[in-house]
Amino acid sequence: MDADSNHPADDGAEEPRDTADAGAGDATRRPAQARAATLLRRPKLWLLPTVLTGLLALLLSLLYMGGIVNPNGHLRHLPIGLVNEDTGKPPPGQRQNVGTQVTAAIAANGTGGAASWRRLTRAQAQDQLSSGKIYGALVVPADFTDSLTALTTANATVRPTITVLTNPGVGSLGSSLAGRITTAAAQQTSVTIGKQLTSSPVTARADSTTRLLLADPVQVVTRIGHPIGAHSGLGLSAFYYTLLLVLAGFLGGNLISTGVDTALGYADNEIGPWHTRRPTVPISRTQTLLLKMVMTAGITVLTVSLVMLATVAILGMDATHLPLLWIYSYCASLAVGLGVQAINAAFGGIGQLVSMFVFIVLGLPSSGATVPLQAVPGFYRFLSVFEPMRQLSDGVRAILFFDARADAGLGRAWLMIGVGAVLALVFGFAMTRYYDRKGLDRLTPQPPPHPPHRAGRPAPSA
């Protein structure tokens, strides 16, 4: 330490500075204090914070942006329904009606692998739209062949249509991607049919207006296949509500952990310029974890209730099955909170950073709630198998948009909540019991507190 730091700071009393006259007053002087300018010249002080902060910024950027920067480039096998209701007779010289030909061609082409076309009946398509299993559907109506045949005669009264059904409950981006794919397939179908009609000898003598109509004969109509409420954030309310549950569990768990450690004397309590440290309470790691988990279970009742009060009652978010939504929200947030306590107990000071990566950093881009999993890199699809946020968002979406159907993701969500809670309990208590058996106690010896003394009075012996 440099020369400046060797002079102890004065405590406010008039004291002589030479050793001969100082006497007992030196015992009351404050310890020598370092200066920031001196410490900033120490490379080792910079090393660890710089490396960790840089790595954190790099990882956050790669993980967050890597999941959303190129959804079109990563889009593969988006599930879309393909419905043929055409009941018309096949045109002369053909074995199948036009609707059958069109749907077979679309399914065979596959739009370059971007879509996974599912050949369904109208009832099956509606059922899968209502359970979030498909992102949209393309429907060829019953009179499609008859309407096309009538275009080449004087009896043409109705322009053929193909209907594009969207599903906003799966998220605005997913529904938009499906709508774009189905619309492009319908338009390509119209162009193909138009080439056949304009090259037919039957239409060779048609006037220019008729030939213009025949060149693009099919009208594409877009409709909502499974409507959701106006106060649903265009399908994003399920994601943001899930994020609230995860944040409530994550932040609440860390606050409870810090509060308990402070109350038991294992952490300092500093508010502004005031600093206190309570006497250390002798307690094992296992009993500390048990205390934190029980408190998490109790306090989560309040946090989840306030989340629902704010989102549903005050902000008016569209929500049904409110008792089920509350129970699900409580169990979901509690599972996250228990996981946070287990990780903190196992990893100590870096536990908050570890749990942040587990529940938030890796969970957001792999949730599939904003960008469909079919439009993210394979790494995120792998994470989605076990990352908590994906499991929780599927359950919330099923309750909010799909009538709380188990096959809409709610059944799997309940299962994964149970698995996550059990893993948190097993992992947390296994680690704390191991530490306790090894004698790795948290108890830190502390000197007894001394009453304040004035300068000139003898100081207590050490």
Image (tube, rainbow, N blue to C red):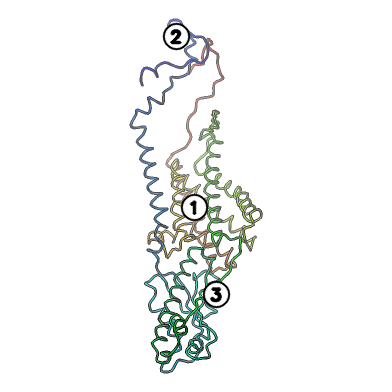
- The picture places residue 456, in percent across and down from the top left corner, at 53, 9
**Spatial distance from mark 1 to mark 3, Cα to Cα?**
36 Å
- Dots 2 and 3: beta carbons under 8 Å? no
Q: Could you tell me the amino acid type at mark 1?
A: Ala
> Disc 1 or 2, which lies upstream in sequence?
2
Image position of 98 (left or right of 112): right
Q: What residue is disc 3 on?
A: 127
Tell me residue 284's x, y (percent): 50, 40
Residue designated by label 2: 17
Where, by quadrant of the figure, is residue 54 drawn?
top left
Along the horizontal axis of the image, is 52 left or right of 140?
Answer: left
Report the residue at 39% width, 18% height from top.
4
Q: Determine which residue is flagged by label 1.
A: 424
Q: Does residue 93 appear in the picture of this structure? A: yes
Front in this rendered view, residue 89 or 122: 89
From this view, report whether residue 197 is shown above or below residue 15: below
Task: Answer few, some or many: residues within 10 Å of disc 3's Cα (few below 14, many 20 plus, some between 14 and 19).
Answer: some
Query: Closest to the observer: 86 or 418?
Result: 86
- Amino acid bearing label 2: Arg
